[in-house]
């Protein structure tokens, strides 16, 4: 059985453990092992974490991951969007605003309250519904900085069930605009939540878990 002692944790994994977020850290929440996202984020941003200035996460919940991002990116403003008013809070460099990720005007209005873009990192960890993930990406990707990334977690299939092994299907539905690229980021294979689901028609639960990254192409 894989345990935390079997793995070297990145600095972001350690912060996920500290702040009790399920994005990584090889710990359990409600008896379930976490995702393995934090090594992927650390590979993307570890060398430039002090240069990141603005981070936006859709989906606040208890604010655990926002606090993780605040500590990991010491020079960044951290923004959170959530449809639930009871989740919103202001704390140190963290500011939260209400937004419905299924309504572009609501997302754009919330972005305006942050002072507008650009953002160096946008994370969609909201409803996990496919149509919301498509709308959120279409609306927020134009707010990326020149070196920014839009990351969709918990990739959903068209029937709302998680289909985490096929980021290409979500990218095709989003319709990546000219000037942008995308790639699937492999986050694990059979590590706790880091796996696709047995009901997946593509891999039958054997395809591992991916994130979808959308980014600006270099000129």
Image: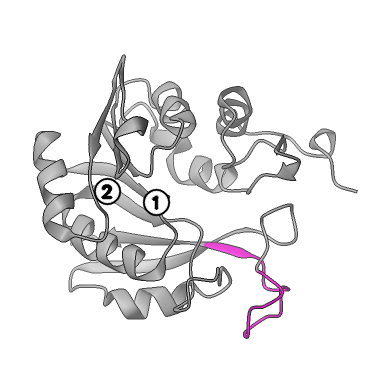
Picture layout, residue 7 above or below residue 142: above
124 relative to 32 in the view: left or right: left
* Mark linked to residue 88: none
How far from the left and from the top, in percent, is residue 35? 63, 49
Residue ID at (41%, 55%): 127
User: At 24% from the left edge and 67% from the top edge, which residue is drawn?
Assistant: 180
The mark that comes first in sequence, 2 or 1, is 1
Q: Is residue 142 above or below residue 182?
A: above
Mark 2: which secondary structure? Answer: strand
Distance between mark 2 and mark 1 Cα atoms: 23 Å
Tell me where residue 73 appears, x and y as whole percent: 39, 27
Residue 128: name its quadrant: bottom left
User: Residue 118 lies in what quarter of the image?
Assistant: top left
Location of residue 11 with respect to 104 vertically, above or below? above
Residue located at (35% from left, 63% from top): 133
Q: Main secondary structure of the magenta part?
A: loop
Circle 2 residues within 10 Å: few <14, some 14–19, many ≥20: few
Q: Is residue 200 above or below residue 184?
A: below
Task: Bin the neighbour count of mark 1 within 10 Å (Cα to Cα): few under 14, some 14-19, many 20 and up.
Answer: many
Find out whether residue 110 is within the magenta segment.
no
Residue 198 falls inside the magenta stretch: yes
Q: Mark 1 = which residue?
A: 126
- Relative placement, left or right, of 191 versus 23 is right
Q: Residue 185 location in percent, x, y?
A: 51, 61
- Judging by the rendered image, the residue that carries numbered circle 2 is 147
Question: For the view shown, which residue lies furthest in the right direction?
Answer: 1
State the scheme by which the image is colored: one colour
State which region is magenta: 197-210
The nearer-to-camera label among 2 and 1 is: 1
Secondary structure beneath dot 1 equals loop
């Amino acid at each position: 059985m894989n345990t935390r002692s079997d793995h070297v944790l990145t600095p972001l994994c350690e912060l996920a453990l500290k702040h009790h977020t399920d994005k990584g850290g090889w710990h359990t929440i409600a008896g379930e092992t976490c995702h393995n996202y934090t090594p992927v984020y650390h590979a993307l941003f570890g060398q430039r974490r002090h240069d990141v200035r603005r981070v936006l996460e859709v989906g606040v919940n208890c604010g655990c991951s926002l606090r993780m991002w605040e500590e990991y990116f010491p020079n960044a403003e951290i923004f959170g969007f959530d449809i639930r008013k009871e989740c919103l809070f202001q704390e140190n460099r963290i500011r939260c605003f209400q937004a419905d990720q299924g309504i572009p005007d609501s997302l754009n209005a919330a972005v305006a309250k942050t002072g507008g873009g650009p953002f160096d990192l946008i994370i969609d960890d909201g409803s996990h519904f496919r149509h919301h993930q498509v709308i959120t990406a279409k609306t927020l990707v134009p707010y990326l900085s020149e070196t920014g990334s839009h990351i969709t977690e918990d990739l959903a299939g068209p029937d709302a069930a998680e289909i985490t092994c096929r980021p290409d299907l979500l990218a095709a539905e989003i319709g990546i605009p000219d000037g942008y690229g995308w790639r699937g980021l492999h986050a694990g294979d059979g590590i706790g939540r880091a796996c696709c689901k047995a009901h997946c028609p593509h891999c039958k639960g054997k395809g591992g878990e991916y994130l979808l990254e959308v980014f600006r192409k270099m000129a």
